[in-house]
Amino acid sequence: MTLPYVIKVGGALLESTEATQAFLHNLYQINDIQSVLVHGGGTQVASLLNKLGYTTIKKDGLRVSPPEQMPYVTGMLAGAVNKKLVAQANSVGLKAVGISALDGKTIRAEVFDNALGAVGQPISADSTLVEQLISSEWLPIMACIGASDEGELLNINADHVAATLAESLQCPLLLLSDVPSVLDAQKQRITEITPASLPTLVNDKVITDGMLVKVDAAMATAQKTHEPVIIAGWRDSLSAILAGDAGTHVLPE
Ligand SMILES: Nc1ncnc2c1ncn2[C@@H]1O[C@H](COP(=O)(O)OP(=O)(O)O)[C@@H](O)[C@H]1O
Ligand SMILES: CC(=O)N[C@@H](CCC(=O)OP(=O)(O)O)C(=O)O
């Protein structure tokens, strides 16, 4: 099997049917790479929780997830968002199968920090199910709902799921967001981040919130896979991103 790409898209993409359709069509056109699509849905979760009268907050980029909210979080991420993405992928000609991080025991997770409630932290990944789907020419589309060994549902940040899966597959990772790249203090594209350049960007608070979660996950994965991890925008074409003409490369050394 050729190495797949793990591609992660954030919830902001899924707010627009047209943008999602364009991205999936682009993925269909790049038919010389196999991929696993991991998705978030933070925007959609926040909107549902707000409608239900909950106040929802993020701490260091992670959503505080009281256990009583998990049926709604799970329903949105592994239900509505995942199935809509599978339906749209199928409609552009892809052959998609919707799964979650917990299916096939793909991601093993534990509670991240009791103060965050049912937020999960991946411990390890077993990519057997994903590899079987890919070798049968299915496109796995994975929601970021995991579970603890005790069977408690956990809300895992989708960047963490994608990173852990790429480490298990030892394959390239693309984290696609609503911004075109990691931006510097002047809002210009940073083309490369290295272990040497990262601490200043963090200490100077140039990289914050969800981007900090993403860059930290990218750096850890780059070091474990010995491959650059690409952080880019879903508005750019995948071929431009893969050619290095867009996005930020997070380098292991
Ligand atoms: N240096 C930075 N460059 C780009 N985006 C940044 C930076 N620092 C913080 N951000 C914020 O991080 C966001 C991307 O993270 P996040 O919202 O979690 O994305 P996603 O939902 O795609 O995972 C951007 O929309 C931006 O508001
Ligand atoms: C623990 C945690 O923060 N979970 C995320 C899961 C969804 C996600 O990661 O969505 P994006 O990729 O769209 O940001 C959340 O509830 O927002």
Image (cartoon, grey):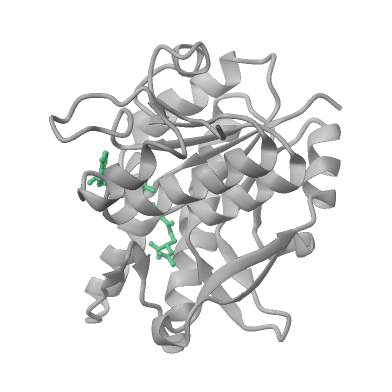
- How far across and how far down the image is residue 139, in percent? 69, 36
Q: Is residue 42 left or right of residue 129?
A: left
Looking at the image, is 104 positioned above or below residue 30?
below
Quarter of the image where the C terminus is located:
top right
In the image, 117 versus 101, the foreground residue is: 117
Residue 42 seen in render: yes
Quarter of the image where the N terminus is located:
top right
Q: Is residue 54 left or right of residue 234?
A: left
The picture quadrant where one finds residue 172 is top right
Q: Quadrant of ligand 2?
A: bottom left
In the image, 50 versus 187, the foreground residue is: 187
Residue 96 seen in render: no
The residue located at (55%, 23%) in the rendering is 27
The residue located at (29%, 44%) in the rendering is 200
- How far across and how far down the image is residue 154, in percent? 55, 75
The picture quadrant where one finds residue 48 is bottom left
- How far across and how far down the image is residue 53, in percent? 22, 81
The residue located at (33%, 30%) in the rendering is 181
Which residue reaches farthest front? 196
The residue located at (79%, 61%) in the rendering is 104
Looking at the image, is 193 positioned above or below residue 105?
above
- How far across and how far down the image is residue 115, in percent? 40, 86
In the image, 26 versus 119, the foreground residue is: 119
How many numbered marks have been drawn onto this rendered protein structure? 0
Looking at the image, is 93 positioned above or below residue 115?
above
Which residue reaches farthest left? 186
